[in-house]
C-alpha cells in the first residue's frame, strides 16, 4: 500500500489508491467518507482518470516516522498511543467497522502537535501488518524500563494475530498506572507458589502469555473503594465494609461556614457586654456563651484537620498495597532493540604513517544563514529542524517555520539530502519547493530555505 502526498494552499493530504468499485459496493468506504470518526483521519473518495483514490487530510499533523526517526520515543508517549488505539477501536465498533483495517505503521499514524492527539488511518482494502510495534520496540527510550518491557511484549504479540495483539494492548494500557514490583511494599502473598515468577516463565513470549492468562485472576488491581466488591488473591470476592474516613469538598465548605458562624456568634456575645448596659449575671452568661462557641469552633477545626490527614494516610497505604494485574517480566533479560554500534568518525593512516585522511562523510559542511552568525552544524546527521524544541534537533525561532519543518540526512560523495516534513511554508532548494515528504540532494553552493530563513550549503 504505497501512499503519496499532496498539498494545496490550505490543506495537506495523504493519497492511497483503492479499487474502482469501492463507491458502489463498499460499505466501509461509504461509512468512512460520510462520517467524521473521532481518532480517524478525515477521508474523501475521488475519481481521477478512471482510478479511485482515498484522500486523507493530514493538515497540521506529523507521522510517527517523521517525529521519531533517529530519536528516542519517550515511554509516556508509548502509553498515550496505546490509550488512543483502544479509544479508536471502541469508536469503530459503533460504526460496525472492522478494526483490523486500521493501518498500524509508522507512516500512517499521525500526531497533531497543536492538540496532542493521535489520528489513525483506516483503509478498507487489504489488511496491513502492524509494523508500528517493531518501530516502537526499536526506538523506545531504554531508560524507561517499564515502557521498554511493554514495547517488547507488544512486538512479540504483533507477530501472532490481531486478537493476541488486542489483548496485549489492553493489558499494557492498564499496566501504565500500576506500581512496579519493587514499589508494592512489604505485603506478602498468601501462597508463594501463586505469585513467584521465575526466569524460565519470562524467557518465552508464548509461555509468558499463557502464564498471564492462568494467573491474572489471583491479583487485586486498582484502588478498592469503600463497600466495593473486588476479587481477593485467591479469586474469591469480598466486600470492604470499613469505609475510609474522609471529608468531601461539600463537607469542608459546610464546616467552614459553621466555623464562621460560631466565631461570629462568639464575637457578638463578647461585644454585647461592651455596647449594652446589662447586669453582672447577664455579663457572665455572655462571656460563658462566647467561650463555649469559641471552643466549639476550635474542636470542629481540629476534627476536620484530623479527618483530612487520616484520609490522606489511608490513601497512601492503599497505593502502597495495590498489586498489579499483569505480571512483570524479568526486565534484566529483555533483548534491546536498535542498539547497533554507532558510526564513528575514524582517521585512516596512509602507508607512511605521516598523514591522515578524512572520509567524505567527515567532510560534511554547514548551512550558513544570511544573518550574521546563523548556521546549522551538519556533523551529526540526521538532523531535524523546526521550532518545536521537544521534537527537533535544531530550533529555528521564526514564525514562518513549522513546528517540525524538515529533516537533513547524510548523502553520498560529501553532499546532504533534505526531506520536507509537510511544512506549511515549504522547503526550497535553489528556489524550487519540495513536495510534501519529498527528499532531494543538496550540493555545495546550493541555496536552502526553510520558510523565510535562507541558508547556503558550504
Image (cartoon, grey):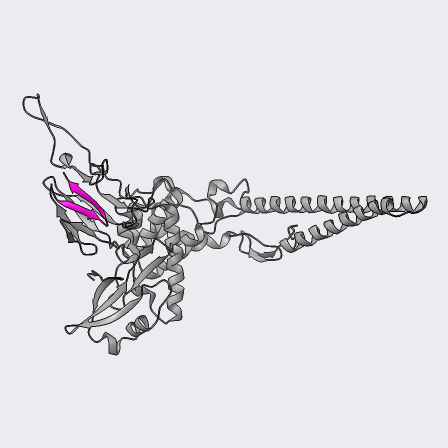
x 5%, y 24%: residue: 351
Residue 190 appears in the rendering: no
Foreground of the two, 427 or 240: 427
Report x, y in % for residue 217: 49, 55
**Residue 453 part of the magenta segment:** yes
Describe residue 240's horizontal placement relative to residue 207 as left or right: right
Position of 455 relative to 436 (above/below):
above
Q: Which residues fall within the magenta stretch? A: 445-458
Foreground of the two, 69 or 1: 69
Quadrant for the N terminus, please: bottom left
x 76%, y 49%: residue: 264
Magenta region, main secondary structure: strand
Report x, y in % for residue 458: 14, 38
**Residue 300 part of the magenta segment:** no
Report x, y in % for residue 130: 28, 57
Report x, y in % for residue 298: 75, 44
Amino acid at each position: 500500500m504505497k501512499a503519496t502526498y499532496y498539498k494545496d494552499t490550505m490543506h495537506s493530504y495523504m493519497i492511497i489508491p483503492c479499487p474502482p468499485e469501492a463507491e458502489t459496493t463498499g460499505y466501509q468506504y461509504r461509512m468512512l467518507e460520510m462520517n467524521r470518526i473521532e481518532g480517524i483521519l478525515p477521508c474523501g473518495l475521488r475519481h481521477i482518470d478512471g482510478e479511485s483514490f482515498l484522500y486523507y487530510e493530514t493538515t497540521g499533523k506529523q507521522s510517527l516516522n517523521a517525529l521519531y526517526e533517529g530519536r528516542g520515543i519517550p515511554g509516556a508517549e508509548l502509553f498515550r498511543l496505546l490509550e488512543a488505539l483502544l479509544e479508536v477501536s471502541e469508536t469503530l465498533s459503533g460504526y460496525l467497522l472492522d478494526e483490523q483495517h486500521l493501518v498500524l505503521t509508522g507512516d500512517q499514524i499521525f500526531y497533531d502537535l497543536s492538540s496532542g492527539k493521535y489520528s489513525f488511518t483506516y483503509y478498507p482494502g487489504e489488511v496491513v501488518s502492524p509494523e508500528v510495534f517493531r518501530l516502537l520496540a526499536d526506538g523506545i527510550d531504554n531508560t524507561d524500563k517499564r515502557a521498554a518491557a511493554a514495547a517488547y511484549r507488544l512486538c512479540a504479540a504483533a507477530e501472532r494475530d490481531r486478537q493476541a495483539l488486542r489483548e496485549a494492548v489492553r493489558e499494557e494500557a492498564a499496566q501504565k498506572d500500576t506500581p512496579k514490583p519493587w514499589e508494592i511494599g512489604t505485603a506478602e502473598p498468601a501462597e508463594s507458589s501463586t505469585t513467584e515468577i521465575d526466569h524460565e516463565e519470562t524467557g518465552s513470549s508464548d509461555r509468558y502469555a499463557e502464564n498471564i492468562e492462568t494467573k491474572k485472576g489471583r491479583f487485586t488491581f486498582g484502588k478498592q473503594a469503600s463497600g466495593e466488591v473486588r476479587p481477593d488473591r485467591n479469586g474469591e470476592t469480598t466486600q470492604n465494609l470499613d469505609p475510609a474516613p474522609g471529608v468531601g469538598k461539600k463537607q469542608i465548605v459546610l464546616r467552614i461556614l459553621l466555623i464562621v458562624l460560631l466565631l461570629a456568634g462568639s464575637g457578638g456575645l463578647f461585644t454585647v457586654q461592651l455596647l449594652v448596659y446589662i447586669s453582672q449575671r447577664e455579663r457572665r452568661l455572655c462571656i460563658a456563651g462566647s467561650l463555649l462557641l469559641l471552643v466549639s469552633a476550635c474542636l470542629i477545626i481540629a476534627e476536620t484537620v484530623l479527618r483530612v490527614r487520616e484520609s490522606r494516610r489511608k490513601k497512601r497505604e492503599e497505593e502502597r498495597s495495590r498489586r498489579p494485574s499483569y505480571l512483570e517480566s524479568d526486565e534484566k533479560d529483555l533483548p534491546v532493540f536498535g542498539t547497533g554500534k554507532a558510526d564513528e568518525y575514524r582517521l585512516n593512516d596512509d602507508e607512511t604513517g605521516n598523514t591522515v585522511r578524512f572520509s567524505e562523510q567527515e567532510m560534511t559542511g554547514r548551512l550558513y544563514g544570511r544573518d550574521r552568525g546563523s548556521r546549522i552544524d551538519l556533523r551529526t546527521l540526521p538532523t531535524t529542524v523546526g521550532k518545536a524544541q521537544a521534537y527537533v534537533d535544531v530550533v529555528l525561532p521564526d514564525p514562518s517555520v513549522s513546528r517540525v519543518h524538515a529533516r537533513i540526512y547524510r548523502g553520498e560523495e560529501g553532499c546532504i539530502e533534505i526531506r520536507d516534513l509537510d511544512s506549511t511554508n515549504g522547503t526550497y532548494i535553489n528556489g524550487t519547493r519540495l513536495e510534501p515528504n519529498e527528499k532531494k540532494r543538496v550540493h555545495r553552493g546550493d541555496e536552502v530555505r526553510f520558510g523565510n530563513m535562507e541558508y547556503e550549503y558550504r
